[in-house]
Image (spheres, rainbow, N blue to C red):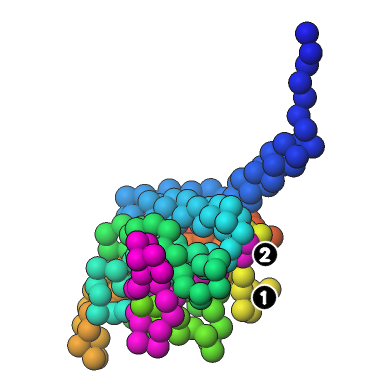
Amino acid sequence: MSVKGFSLLELLVVLAVMGVMMGVLGFSFLGNSSSGLGDAQRAVLSYLQQTKAVSVGSGLETRIIISAESDDLEKYLRHAQIITLDNNGSGHWTIMDKGIYLPKDVWFISDSIESGNSNWPTDGECVWSASQQDEEFRLSLTRSKNGEQKVFEESPEGTRFLFLRCLPNGNFSSSSYPQMPKLVFAKGRLIPSTSGDLIPSFTNGKEIAGVQIQPYGGIFTLDPQDFTYD
């Protein structure tokens, strides 16, 4: 009777998978799931891992895009979606899924939104992969050459998105290294802005949570006590 062992390639694959999984073991989930923040935290963590898997598996740059159009109240700062750069050099982005929504009354916190609270944490907002110069990431829905698959193409007239960029090695990139991207979300409500649009308003600096991405693939959760309050 012969005993079959693992090949070197099989061992490397197992180690690579373990490395990806260990990257997210340094966190504990937020206990306040009743407010929706715990549910949001779990959903976002899972989505980040899914994005990493897509990027590594395809060998292509992959992004999580967040809707940033304030006139689309259903999706504005609540809807996230995964897209992958087309590998044929067209510059198009393949849509990988239908996306996820944050729980009711929970929004991602963009730097374009005022908290309306002087006690809001100074670091209580998302840090995106884009720099100030290329923050305008606009996409228009189109179709691939075979006319079957919906894809996005970059267009000045397209819908505005904020994004996190994941490289083919599974690491998220930052335009301001060593500061890395992070996703921050909070419980809030919609109020009219000066322009007449409804925008999320946040008044309780303790109803906040997030996830912090580390330089080498680790991901940590952020609870209210992890933010800086003046």
Mark with earlier residue (2, 1): 1
Quarter occupied by residue 196: bottom left
Do we see residue 115 in this rendering? no
Check disc 2: other Cα within 10 Å, few if <14, some if 14-19, many if 20+.
Answer: some
Q: Which residue is more in the foreground, 31 or 156?
A: 156
| Residue 76 is inside the magenta segment | no
Q: Which residue is more in the foreground, 147 or 61?
A: 147
Residue type for callout 1: Tyr
Could you tell me which residue is drawn at 79 percent across and 13 percent down? Answer: 2
**Label 2: element kind:** loop
| Residue 164 is inside the magenta segment | yes
Which residue extends farthest top?
1
Q: Magenta residues?
A: 141-168
Could you tell me which residue is drawn at 78 percent across and 16 percent down? Answer: 3
Q: Position of residue 52 (x, y in %)?
A: 56, 56
Residue type for callout 2: Pro
Q: Position of residue 209 (x, y in %)?
A: 45, 61
Q: Which residue is more in the foreground, 210 or 66?
A: 66
Residue 215, labelled with which disc? 2
Kindly check if marks 2 and 1 are in contact, taking CB atoms under 8 A apart as contact. Answer: yes
Could you tell me which residue is drawn at 65 percent across and 44 percent down? Answer: 17
Q: Position of residue 127 (x, y in %)?
A: 52, 74
Is residue 4 shown left or right of residue 19? right
Q: Which residue does the numbered mark 1 point to in the structure image? A: 177
